[in-house]
Image (spheres, grey):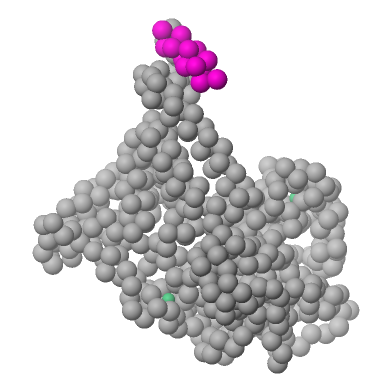
Amino acid sequence: MTLEKVDPVEVFDAGDKGRGLRTTKALVIGDVVFTEASFSAVVFDSLSMQVCHNCFRRHASPHRCAQCKFAHYCDRTCQRAAWDEHKRECAAIRTAGKTPKENIRLAARAMWRMLKYGGKVVDSQLTSLDLLQDHISDMVDEDLKELQDDVQRFLEYWPKTKRALGTEYISHLLGVIKVNGFTLSDQRGLQAVGVGLFPNLCLVNHDCWPNCTVILNHGNQSALDSAFHSQRRIELRVLGTIPEGEELTVSYIDFLKLSKDRQQLLKKQYYFDCKCEHCSKGIKDDLMMATKTDEKPSADQVKEVTEFGLKAFEKIEEARISGDFEEVVKLCRECLQKQEAVLADTHLHHLRVLSIASEVLSFMRSFKEAAECASRMVVGYGKLYHPSNAQLGMATMRAGVTNWHAGLIEVGHGLICKAFAILMVTHGPHHSITKDLEVMRSQTEAELQMFKQNEKAYQSVREAALFGKPLAEPIKEQVKELVQGAK
Ligand SMILES: [Zn+2]
Ligand SMILES: [Zn+2]
Ligand SMILES: [Zn+2]
């Protein structure tokens, strides 16, 4: 097998892990290793009527394909752009009289693309789908049964007049999708809306403490309003200094789990045993289970609080699903009170409650309490996550906004600046979230100045904006002065 290369990476034999990608020159933090458009992608079944099947933007009243009545688009521009990809799918859905689930649709789209263009659609593509691992030999009975059912569904959907495909090849393709399908988010990067295949990205192996991160960047959003709708493009971005010849890695899962739980999850979903340094040495496991150090609690106390937490999570989840947010807050407060005397600020149970509490309290507009929870959560996250971790950046951003809403403008501005620094690395300067953060940064900076000049006027303006309280006359005058002074 010849090993491919495209500046600055090459494919290499990574031993147990199969093939991998390594650098052909040194890279530094914030570099983009490569960008890659999806080989094929589909919108999730559950969102097929709310998300554009071309650019994956959410749309309140999308335009429907009159023929299959399944595909939806922003407008005719998106529909036209998607026709090459949708044409055969549209006919297959009409013939079958029903739409198969997302992984079958994705396999068929990939298949049509391969039949039309061959296994390699662009020069920079380092591998074909044929050569990717499907992990079928590692699958447990349950997974194999599901795979067989999916092969049947694929055959029912695939046009009968087309060249017949062997079941073995269809199994391979569905296996590749199962282990390599990459979740696509909407244009704001906030909600998962679909799944796609990115062959080069598939070559990047996992590490729980990776040197790269992958981010979906739908491109320039203002350009999206004109003829250029999104290309469903990912960027592989560098998180630190990487010397020449070193393997590039990303994390397939969130880091905030104990080593053994991460290993278990990776085995179940991706069929490999993680032997990364963090898993082998259990790095940070101690912090994730840490208890208070000043007044060391007894083993019984720890056991009681842990068990209480586990039971509470179930109740919290139930209350959340039924929309009883008052109950969620009550349960969280109870939990936090018990945990505070016993668990350290990095304990996973404690962080989980803080995360839920800050989210629900924000939603209920109890900004002060939400801000306190969010701030504490970010302190814990900061001790556990890699300093350039996208989840850390997003959580810091949310904590910044919550503090800002709570009128804690100094803390809010500080957190927003911190989040901006992280997202400049993980998302890059052109991502829509980074751009939003930049706007928030200038806005909070201006407000901070205003706050330093006249705190009372600042708080009144804030309350007027948040809660619709009218401004008192003398405050109005002060605000006028402040605004004029700021110019
Ligand atoms: Zn669109
Ligand atoms: Zn159609
Ligand atoms: Zn690991």
- From the top left corner, tell me how far across and down residue 245 is, in percent: 57, 80
Q: Determine the residue located farthest toward the right in the rendered image.
A: 161
Report if residue 450 is visible in the image. Answer: yes
Residue 154 placement, left or right of 89 = left
Residue at the spot 86% in from the left edge and 54% down from the top edge: 80
Q: In terms of secondary structure, what is the magenta stretch mainly?
A: helix
Q: Quadrant of ligand 3?
A: bottom left
Residue at the spot 72% in from the left edge and 64% down from the top edge: 37
Residue 360 versus residue 214 in the image, above or below = above
Residue 486 falls inside the magenta stretch: yes
Q: Quadrant of residue 158?
A: bottom right
Residue at the spot 65% in from the left edge and 62% down from the top edge: 234
Which corner quadrant holds the N terminus?
bottom right
Magenta residues, start to end? 474-487
Residue 419 versus residue 270 in the image, above or below = above
Residue 223 versus residue 345 in the image, above or below = above
Residue at the spot 20% in from the left edge and 61% down from the top edge: 291
Report the number of discs.
0
- From the top left corner, tell me how far across and down residue 412 is, in percent: 41, 38
Which corner quadrant holds the C terminus?
top right
- From the top left corner, tell me how far across and down residue 156 is, in percent: 76, 76
Q: Determine the residue located farthest toward the bottom in the rendered image.
A: 1
Residue 73 falls inside the magenta stretch: no
Q: Quadrant of residue 144?
A: bottom right
